[in-house]
Image: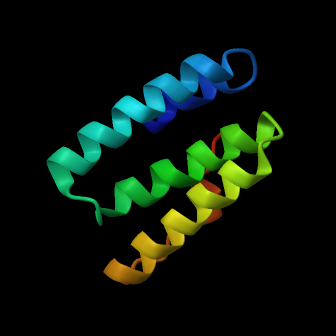
Amino acid sequence: MFEYTHIYCKQHNQRALTYMRRADYLLRLAGGPEHPDVAALYINTAMIYLDLRNIKTALRYLHRCACVSVSVSVSVSVSVCVCA
């Protein structure tokens, strides 16, 4: 799933956000809200919002990622960002 996010990041940010919202719903449904992939999705979503210059929303997603990472004791590296 994360391989496809970079396709939309540069030219189709709004479409990418739509797909990210769907992925968020499905990941949280399948793996729970504290799954490490949810944290990685939050990082990628934050990078899209940063690209759109929506810093406040990007920080909200980064905070969510940090909360998920702390709750499952998993270190999610920023290197998973495909939109940076």
As drawn, 71 above or below 25: below
x 52%, y 73%: residue? 66
Which of the 4 image quadrants contains residue 34? bottom left
x 46%, y 33%: residue? 20
x 73%, y 54%: residue? 56
x 19%, y 54%: residue? 31
Residue 23 appears in the rendering: yes
Q: Quadrant of the N terminus?
A: top left
Q: For this rendering, which residue is in front, 16 or 57?
A: 57
Residue furthest to the front: 56
As drawn, 72 above or below 34: below
Left/right of residue 82 with respect to residue 17 in the rendered view: right
Which of the 4 image quadrants contains residue 52? top right
As drawn, 50 above or below 6: below
Q: For this rendering, which residue is in front, 32 or 40?
A: 32
Q: Position of residue 13 (x, y in %)?
A: 67, 23
